[in-house]
Image: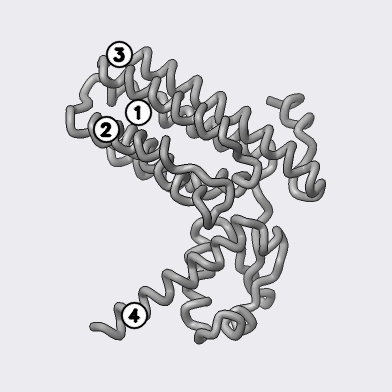
Amino acid sequence: MQVTENKKVLADDIYRQIKGQIMDQAFQPGKRLNIEALAVEMNVSPTPVRESLARLAAERLVTSEPFKGYSVNQPLNSHQVADLMHVRRLIELEAVRIAARRIMFPELMMLEENLSQERQHYGQSWAAGYQGFNQLDQKFHEGLIAAADNPYLLDAYQSLNIHVLLARFHPSFEDGDHTDTCDEHNAILQALKNHNAEAAALAIEAHLRNTEIRIFGFQNHLQTLNPTINKSLSETFQNH
């Protein structure tokens, strides 16, 4: 049993290390990830590296191609972000309308505690803090959807892998973005406390719209640093 647990701990640690290097762009988009080379570099057997890359492929951070192995995926381009946010609106607006009518005190307290932790948790580096904030943000949104008491809505939302995909823009995330996100979450929470379905829907719509604007801004900043990462933002505004 102890051996199995140790293997799991090791696999989780390797997974976090590789993911951190992808998120902080130490492993650039398009980079080939050789299992044997990574194993030597990390002083482990190829097995935990292989398992980690399989997990990252499920999160759509890497791609496996026959006879080529794994490579780091490109971040979402502007069209993909717009499409993802469109689906996100369809799920979250309906979920908060339902949640506002039926949410219970323990669920509200969980969301409030989560928001309190969000306000305290900020960091631009993935390893130094943004990972924690991203996880809290994901937990808040999943809590909203879970409060609608429809497991199919939650399954659909989780399958989009939104927070991992959008978190790749975190190098451009600033303290003002953190504050705005928390304030927008608070507006949603207050509407839910009042059991006001339309106010909750308006608050989540405003939050998702502002999130999309922030992401487009992050893309623009990353393009300045690396023009090959994404297509021009002008294409998105012309077509959406």
Q: Please, what is the three-letter code of the amino acid marked with disc 1?
A: Ala
Of badges 3 and 4, the one in the foreground is 4
Of callouts 2 and 4, which one flags the residue occurring earlier in the amino acid sequence?
4
Q: Please, what is the three-letter code of the amino acid marked with disc 4?
A: Asn
Q: Is residue 28 above or below residue 157?
A: below
User: Which quarter of the figure has residue 42?
Assistant: bottom right
Q: Please, what is the three-letter code of the amino acid marked with disc 2?
A: Ala
- SS label for mark 1: helix
Q: State the separation of the CA atoms marked 3 and 4.
A: 49 Å
User: Which quarter of the figure has residue 20?
Assistant: bottom right
Q: Name the residue beneath numbered marker 1.
A: 95
Q: Which residue occupies 77% across, 41% down?
A: 231
Q: Quadrant of the N terminus?
A: bottom left
Q: State the separation of the CA atoms marked 2 and 4.
A: 36 Å
Q: Quadrant of the C terminus?
A: top right
Q: Residues within 10 Å of mark 2 (few under 14, many from 20)?
A: many
Q: Name the residue beneath numbered marker 4.
A: 6
Q: Name the residue beneath numbered marker 3.
A: 196
Q: Please, what is the three-letter code of the amino acid marked with disc 3?
A: Asn
Circles 2 and 1, Cβ within 8 Å, touching? The answer is yes
Q: Residues within 10 Å of mark 4 (few under 14, many from 20)?
A: few
Q: Position of residue 78 (x, y in %)?
A: 69, 37
Of callouts 2 and 1, which one flags the residue occurring earlier in the amino acid sequence?
1
- SS label for mark 3: loop
Q: State the separation of the CA atoms marked 2 and 1.
A: 8 Å
